Structures are given as C-alpha cells and as structure tokens.
Image (tube, grey):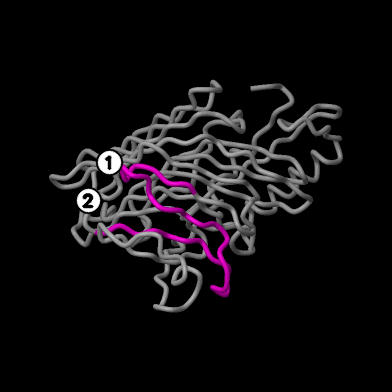
Amino acid sequence: MSGRLRTVLASLGAFGLGVALTAVVMSWGAGAHAPDGVARSSATSARAEHAALAALAQMQLTAPDQPAPHTAGVGPAAAHQPNTTNAIKDTGSFNWSGYLDKTTTKNYFTSVSGSWTQEKVTCSAEDRMSSTWVGIDGASDKTVEQTGTLAWCYEDAAYYYSWYEMYPAATVVIGTEVKAGDKISASVTRSGTSYDMVLTDSTTSGNDVSITKTCALATCHDTSVEWINERPTVPTGMAPLVQYRTWSLTGAAAAGGSTSGVITAFPTTYNTQMVDSYDNYPLATAGTLNSSGSGFTTTWDDSY
C-alpha cells in the first residue's frame, strides 16, 4: 500500500451495501494522483476524509432493500417482459438490477458464481455509486453472504474496490487497486454452516478475496442466490447510481438441493429491474438471458 494511501478501514463497521455496503475514501498527498489521473490537493484530501468519517458516523447496518414485485400493468417492468419461459418472473426493485433464484425451502442453496469485467464509470461533481456482486440470501431475508466490486465517483474521480460481506457484520473492503476493465470472477460456496467467499481479479494484483465465515443454519436461511448490479445505501438513503454503459455477467452458475446449473436451472427465477423511487422509469435494465441461461447484460438508464 502506498505511503500516500490511507484507507478509512477502522470505521467501516457502519456502512451498508445491498444489505450493507462499505465506503472507503482515498486520502492523497499534495500533488499525488488519484486512480483516474485527477490531481488531488491536500485540501481536497481533507474534504474527502471528512466526508467519509461523517458518513461512517451516521451509517447503521440496515435490512436489505428487498426487490418489490410490480403490480401487473404498473411500472416499467410491466412493459419490459423479456422472458416468457422457464418460470422467469419480472419484478421491480429500487436498488437491484439483475437475476435471482428463490425457494421457500430453508438451507437449500449451496453455491453461486459468476464473472464480469469491471465497468468503467463516468463521473461528475455528484457522488455516485454502483456495486456488482454474487451472493446467497438477501432477497427474502436480512442475511447476506456476498462478494463483489464497488465503483464510487467522489468529487469527479472514479475509485474501485473489492469487498465481501457476511451477516451480521458490515461489508469489508479487501482491494483498493481495482481498475476499470479488470477481469473479475466471484463465488460464494456453503458447506453446512461454513461459507467460502472468493473473488479473483485476474488483471490487477492485491484485490483477491478469500475468506471463510460461519452462520448457524437457523440464522442464514440460504433461500436465494443472486447476480446483481446495485446502488448501495448511504446515510441519506440510496446513493445515485453511477453512470456506466453496460455491465455483463457471464458464467453464472448455482447449486441447491440436488440441482446444479445455470440461472434457469431452478424453478423460480426473477428478472429484476431497478426503478426510480416513484416506479415511473428504469434506472438499470437487466436484459434477456443468453441462450445458455448463464449470462445477461444490464444497461444504465438513469441515476435516481
């Protein structure tokens, strides 16, 4: 880690993601350059650190913003019906875009995985965020076992991180050197009460995640698996979704019970569209699954 780089890791116990997403702010010395090449003055560094500490002081771990099904004929998801087979259902969410499988059988799912290229984001003076991840749980309850990457625009500069989250703790940032264009693969695998969260950045070193945590079967229900692009929760509500072109998930796979396979291998699959707070227009649109049922692309539409 560079001597100029100071991460606000000691205070990360408070930020929230999809269920709880952490924020990390880089503090750069005078004349140093942020990852996007924008020069940072000491005054800018001080403002960034102050903003981070203020946000972390306010943030509390909260329940996930669960996908909310649309009423038939209402909202963009009703007009956007890309899937008509394999029991795929269209649903709307204020903070998720992507696909998920659900079941009512507790402790059913045992693994989820997928790969993507870290999307390049377009920044402005407004702070915006986008998180991409795979995980178990979170669609039906407050527990989550997830790993992924985060893009954050702070004062017109882009920062990228790798992270994991294991209920009931907040998100833990692992890599601070993720770059746009990095090739990412991620998985969460459960064996009994043990969860392995693994993320590999095959492009840039120092960002890999490999951690094992435990959760009682009565607490973590393992009733859903997800492949999601999300706008995280911040102290004032949901963050504006950072602008990007597209995010493509490939190689999606999951296992549960006696079944293993692609997204559509399970009885109940949801195509989830991220919508604005009034359910009037889309923020991020998850397109149709590819022919094998193992991939899809989300497209940025708006920030809030």
- Rendered residue at 54%/57% (across/down): 284
Residue 267 has which mark? none
- Residue 178 sits in quarter: top right
Q: Which residue is mark 2?
A: 217
- Rendered residue at 43%/79% (across/down): 73
Q: Amino acid at mark 2?
A: Leu
Q: Crowdedness of circle 1 by 10 Å Cα count: few (<14), some, many (20+)? A: many
Q: Amino acid at mark 1?
A: Ser
- Residue 261 sits in quarter: top left
- Residue 166 sits in quarter: top left
Q: Which residues are drawn in magenta?
A: 268-297
- Rendered residue at 27%/59% (across/down): 85
Q: Earlier in the sequence, mark 1 or mark 2?
A: 1
Residue 6 vertical position relative to residue 281 in the rendered view, above or below: above
In the picture, measured across the screen, residue 233 lies left or right of residue 292, that is right
Residue 97: image location, x then y, percent? 47, 56
Residue 280 on the magenta segment: yes
Residue 210 on the magenta segment: no
Residue 38 vertical position relative to residue 89 in the rendered view, above or below: above
Residue 12: image location, x then y, percent? 57, 44
In the picture, measured across the screen, residue 250 lies left or right of residue 240, that is left
Residue 138: image location, x then y, percent? 37, 56
Which residue is at the front of the view, 216 or 17? 17
Residue 241: image location, x then y, percent? 61, 55
In the picture, measured across the screen, residue 164 lies left or right of residue 10, that is left
Q: Crowdedness of circle 2 by 10 Å Cα count: few (<14), some, many (20+)? A: few
State the SS at label 1. strand
Q: Which residue is mark 1?
A: 111
- Rendered residue at 33%/48% (across/down): 136
